[in-house]
Image (spheres, grey):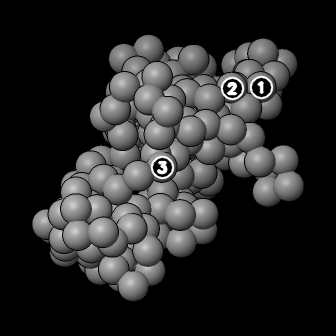
Amino acid sequence: MIPCFGAAAYALFRAAGETPIGVFLAALILPALIVPVHEVAHMIGYGVDPRSTSLITGIWPAHGIWYVLFDGPLRRDRVLFMLAAPVLLVSVPLGLAAVVVGGPSGWLLTYLAAMHTALCIVDVGTFVRILRQVPRCAWVHNQGWNTYWSETPPALLESEGKTVGGQEFWR
């Protein structure tokens, strides 16, 4: 995370050398605007219809977060893609655009890419934890701050009269 913030600061410094007022204003405003884009990337990563009643988005003022979550079990690989989606769909394109654009605007895009990547630290940590701890064939279900997994398909659990998400059937 620190290298990303360092890269962001360097990029901002380079951009500000030529157009200080505009770049600094953009550096203050654009990171706030990138949050909804980040959450839309998660939404795309879930791979479900955006109108699904199981797809929930909201703002949690007490924790200062905007979130998107899917209220139901998903395959482990789908959850990993959902967690990686903001880096793949936001940070990487911003970085590539920075190379193409160049100049002060390119440095500003580099700043945004580095800052966004640094702010993805929770997603990256969760990605690594699921990658290392959850078997490839498992189903993953988030309930609040807890994440459960099971190798038994959710439909089979329900057909046996067991509730999906019950802690005794989810690890």
Between 99 and 31, the one lying in front of the other is 31
**Contact, mark 1 vs mark 2 (Cβ under 8 Å):** yes
In what quadrant of the picture does the N terminus appear? bottom right
Residue 144's spot in the image, x, y percent?
60, 63
Q: Where is mark 1, residue-wise? A: 29
Kindly identify the amino acid type of the residue bearing the numbered disc 2: Leu
In what quadrant of the picture does the C terminus appear? bottom left
Residue 58's spot in the image, x, y percent?
68, 38
Kindly identify the amino acid type of the residue bearing the numbered disc 3: Asp
Between 114 and 153, the one lying in front of the other is 153
Measure the C-alpha gap from mark 1 to mark 2. Answer: 7 Å
Q: Is residue 3 above or below residue 113?
A: below
Q: Which mark is residue 33?
A: 2
User: What residue is rendered at 79% in x and 31% in y?
Assistant: 28
Q: Where is mark 3, residue-wise? A: 71
Kindly identify the amino acid type of the residue bearing the numbered disc 1: Ile
User: What residue is rendered at 77% in x and 25% in y?
Assistant: 29
Give whichever of discs 3 and 2 has the lower sequence position: 2
Measure the C-alpha gap from mark 3 to mark 2. Answer: 26 Å
Between 44 and 6, the one lying in front of the other is 44
